[in-house]
Image (cartoon, helix red, strand yellow):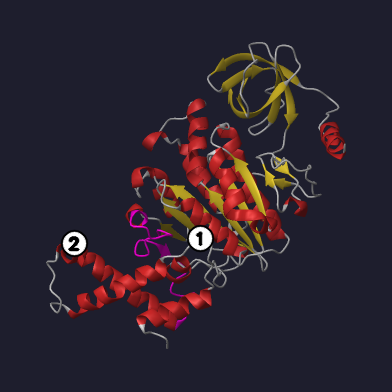
Amino acid sequence: MIEYIETLQAEIDDIKPIRITGKVTSIRGVIIECSGINDFVSIGSRCKIYNSSKTTHILSEVVGFDNEYVLLMPFNEIDGIGSGAIVEVYQHENVIYPHESWLGRVLDGFGKPIDGKAMVSNGDKAYHLKANPLPSQKRNRIGKKIDLGVKSIDSFVPCCYGQRLGIFAGSGVGKSVLISMLTRYASTDIKVIGLIGERSREAKEFIEEYLGKEGLKKAVIIMATGDESPLMRKRATYMTITIAEYFRDLGKEVLCIMDSLTRFAMAGREIGLAIGEPPTTKGYTPSVFSELPKILERAGPGIDNSNITGLFTVLVEGDDQNEPISDAVRGLLDGHIVLDRTIAERGRFPAVDVLKSVSRAVPKCNSFLENKQIAFAKKMLSVYQDMAEMIRLGAYKKGTDPEVDQAISYYGKIEKFLHQPPDEASPMEKTYAELGKILGITK
């Protein structure tokens, strides 16, 4: 009964005193063209499109204009919509009203719960989905290191409060498991997680199995699965970063995880091509590359003592680290974590390639001893990799090169150190103590 009253109240709140309507004139693919409302809407305005019997409607968004016609893209399937269908202007501003009660909930791109629980409360302050980033001159500098609880990252690719890191991975190399570890173990007040374009099964598995009830208590999850419209996937991405901004404004340290930024770019590509944008590399439209920095720059250091630390996954197509989205995102972030298929295939998880991964907070964020440990460990791994083929073939004879001999003796120990079961957290202090003991560098 309470849920019914809450739903009824939400519908009453949506009632507009004056109805502005138009008509559908044509439908081309996923683009619906209509007339009669072009003087009353702008890009981003939402409209309702009614079916022929006017019993149900679908939501759509204004994505473009063509002379006197308005171009709409639907959030849902357009079955039952035909030429002459009534179009009603529904909402002009793309705003949400976040509330602390959203913690522990799973929401869609409109902020409506999809976890089977009661409706969420709305806050008093409106947050624009496409707000501008904070002014760079007023922002803090990157803060101290975050304890993420993952050995390979805390030691070789440390992340600081307000930093933005990319996780670059192909399919099936343990990206989702790594994300779940970071979500559970990271020492931040709030986690805001955007599951963008994921498979329904994987999203449910992530929430119930990897994250669990305890992990969900201090998290908000925004979900738009791969079968949903590109408009919904794109909106869910903006929803994620906007909710992160809300909690940052409350003085919280926020970890914003977006999985994945590539699906956001693909959604932008679908929309751009549908409205006639010219394709560029791999079909991506120019608007995709202009929107990426607008999303990424909204994460980062805050003005007061609160920040949005961003972890953005990038799905690398065909394991090509230089494909368009990977290349563009790498230049916008403060570092990147590379997951390698070869490492995953030999059973070492998380499959972080520590030699190809970079944190731009290093060396300033580390102590002298920590930098010394990491530099030596990287040197040993690099020397071993250079000689790996000869070592495997038995062509290298022990004693030929003392440095190679040293690398061989350390390689197995470092690889064992980098392996970490997903249900075991490793505090940062313990991580560096363990690495120092392995390398014999403790002071």
Q: Relative to the observer, which residue lies in front, 140 or 27?
A: 27
Part of the protein shown in magenta: 344-368
401 with respect to 172 (left or right): left
Q: Main secondary structure of the magenta part?
A: loop
Where residue 429 appears, as percent x and y from the top left, is 52, 78
What amino acid is labelled 2 in the image? Glu
In the rendered image, the vertical position of residue 79 relative to residue 264, given as above or below: above
Marking on residue 422: 1
What amino acid is labelled 1 in the image? Pro
Where residue 227 appears, as percent x and y from the top left, is 55, 32
In the rendered image, the vertical position of residue 196 relative to residue 147, given as above or below: above
Camera-side mark, 1 or 2: 1
Quarter of the image where one finds residue 31? top right
Question: Mark 1–mark 2 contact, CB under 8 Å?
Answer: no
Residue 151 visible (yes or no): yes
Residue 353 lies in the magenta stretch:
yes
Q: Residue at x 61, y 64 (%)?
A: 139
Name the N-terminal-most of marks 1 and 2: 2
Where residue 342 appears, as percent x and y from the top left, is 32, 54
Where residue 175 appears, as percent x and y from the top left, is 46, 52
Which residue was labeled with disc 2? 389
Q: Relative to the observer, which residue lies in front, 266 or 384?
A: 384
